[in-house]
Amino acid sequence: NAMLSWQRTAYHFQPQKNWMNDPNGPLYHKGWYHPFYQYNPDSAIWGNITWGHAVSKDLIHWLYLPFAMVPDQWYDINGVWTGSATILPDGQIMMLYTGDTDDYVQVQNLAYPANLSDPLLLDWVKYKGNPVLVPPPGVGVKDFRDPTTAWTGPQNGQWLLTIGSKVGKTGIALVYETSNFTSFKLLDGVLHAVPGTGMWECVDFYPVSTEKTNGLDTSYNGPGVKHVLKASLDDNKQDHYAIGTYDLAKNKWTPDYPELDCGIGLRVDYGKYYASKTFYDPKKERRVLWGWIGETDSESADLQKGWASVQSIPRTVLYDKKTGTHLLQWPVEEIESLRAGDPIVKEVDLQPGSIELLGVDSAAELDIEVSFEVDKVALQGIIEADHVGFSCSTSGGAASRGILGPFGVIVIADQTLSELTPVYFYISKGADGRAETHFCADQTRSSEAPGVGKQVYGSSVPVLDGEKHSMRLLVDHPIVESFAQGGRTVITSRIYPTKAVNGAARLFVFNNATGASVTASVKIWSLESANIRSFPLQDL
Ligand code: DQQ
């Protein structure tokens, strides 16, 4: 049965069985990275939401730990929902999370580790005064969830945090102040609101440096800092972000580019990816992003295979100085420890309409970097190019040819190309008559199985003067994470190959443009599997 053989990943984090969704409360403590996650202990579909817990020393190899929190109180009996950690200057950890009450009201609760000297933080205590926050007047009791990490406010000892909600169809971020994480006051106004975007789930709010290449602690503020606002839109299950300016005293965040406001502009990831959350990693001074990669098959198929969802490879997040509009997301450097030996390095000339097999071992587990040089004459002739108003999702995929695209790689393909997932660039003429590059991932032929997602994902991506068209792909059996232009645009593909599995998987480069040849410079590493094991272990 093809369905039962559907593959698990080799180096993405996933529980041994059952359902998982949002990443929760990621933090670093005494040498260990701790992610928590929404988990159903009883089934491969959503329900009984409990906090799963795992630890890692390097964000790659994992130990499963016992559940951190289960739904066992009136204020979270219908689910221990999403939350975030705040680490106080004295090392205390405040975990705020949403509880779905016995009455299906969304309230905020406090939990903290029973024993901070335990590096594994195995025991969690729910505060006896829970809930610490109930929905404020004017907000629906089912529209008040997912508290962020707190940051320091203008007054001494004051902390601020935001919680997503909506008023009518306007998505909003409410701000609360607290000094003790047990009593809170709602601030006047909202941090930000965007009409038409609906309920904001899993809001994330953090500073990025406009000058340095390190990440910033959530409370960091001052010159050379911008703030990112991210909202997960319940209406379309997409993560959106915008970069802007935060006025701490006025409790206001303003997007730098109103047309790129949060919820109507850029997405964190244009594929299957939701409910993402960042944390500051003090060990490597970086901001690390986690995201939930859900399923695109049916619930009955998930029940049959006994598990659902994985977490993305953690990504570092930086401000893109060159565009000023985009973030740069990149797989954490530790992923490179899975590279098995030296890469295959190759240059391939691709005439219009050509495809070339790249012979690699284990093409189902790869780290690939490719940069494409497009024939200059053809590029200058862009004014002649067809497809004004090209968009990945309505383009018909990699099989539709234009003058300057598509060209890219084909992953998780079988030898005969009966299953294939092309990830590619397509250069079209923008509304201004200039070249506009699109980065797409085409799932239409990714699986011969019925009832699985087969969309074409993608978006336009800025390619600046002097830059080549470059992409990096992490291929892990049913998951492909694709990063264009150093991580300006990212697409996660969740695919269900039935033939292009394990040793049958192949890798190709292709150029399906009609009017330009391209040269592909390729670097390919085979990746080893990560160690994901159960606690307790002898070798801790
Ligand atoms: N998932 C959680 C909620 C959150 C949603 C419940 C987002 O707290 O709003 O499992 O996926």
Image (tube, helix red, strand yellow):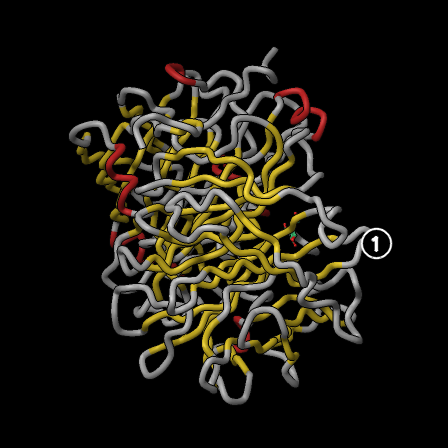
> What residue is drawn where x is 38% and y is 67%?
90
Q: Is residue 138 visible?
A: yes
Looking at the rendering, which quadrant does residue 415 occupy?
top left
Task: Report the front residue among 232 and 492.
Answer: 232
Looking at the rendering, which quadrant does residue 259 occupy?
bottom right
Give the side of residue 89 with respect to residue 246, left or right.
left
Q: Residues within 10 Å of mark 1 (few under 14, many from 20)?
A: few
> What residue is drawn where x is 40% and y is 71%?
207
Point out residue 128 in the picture as x, y percentages from the top left corner: 66, 59
Position of the C terminus by quadrant:
top left
Q: Which residue is mark 1?
A: 103
Point out residue 166 in the picture as x, y percentages from the top left corner: 72, 68
Label 1 amino acid?
Asp
Point out residue 254 in the picture as x, y percentages from the top left corner: 52, 80
Point out residue 277 in the picture as x, y percentages from the top left corner: 49, 55
* Residue behind label 1 places its C-beta within 8 angstroms of ligand 1: no
Give the side of residue 103 with respect to residue 280, left or right.
right
> What residue is drawn where x is 36% and y is 35%?
409
Position of the N terminus by quadrant:
top right
Residue at the right extreme, as displayed? 103
Looking at the rendering, which quadrant does residue 304 occupy?
top right
Q: Is residue 440 visible?
A: no
Up-down: is 531 above or below 291?
above
Residue at the bottom extreme, as displayed? 249
> What residue is drawn where x is 42% and y is 47%?
34
Task: Report the front residue among 170 and 146.
Answer: 146
Residue at the top extreme, as displayed? 1
Up-down: is 534 above or below 48?
above
Secondary structure beneath label 1: loop
Question: For the image shown, how many numbered marks are present on the structure?
Answer: 1
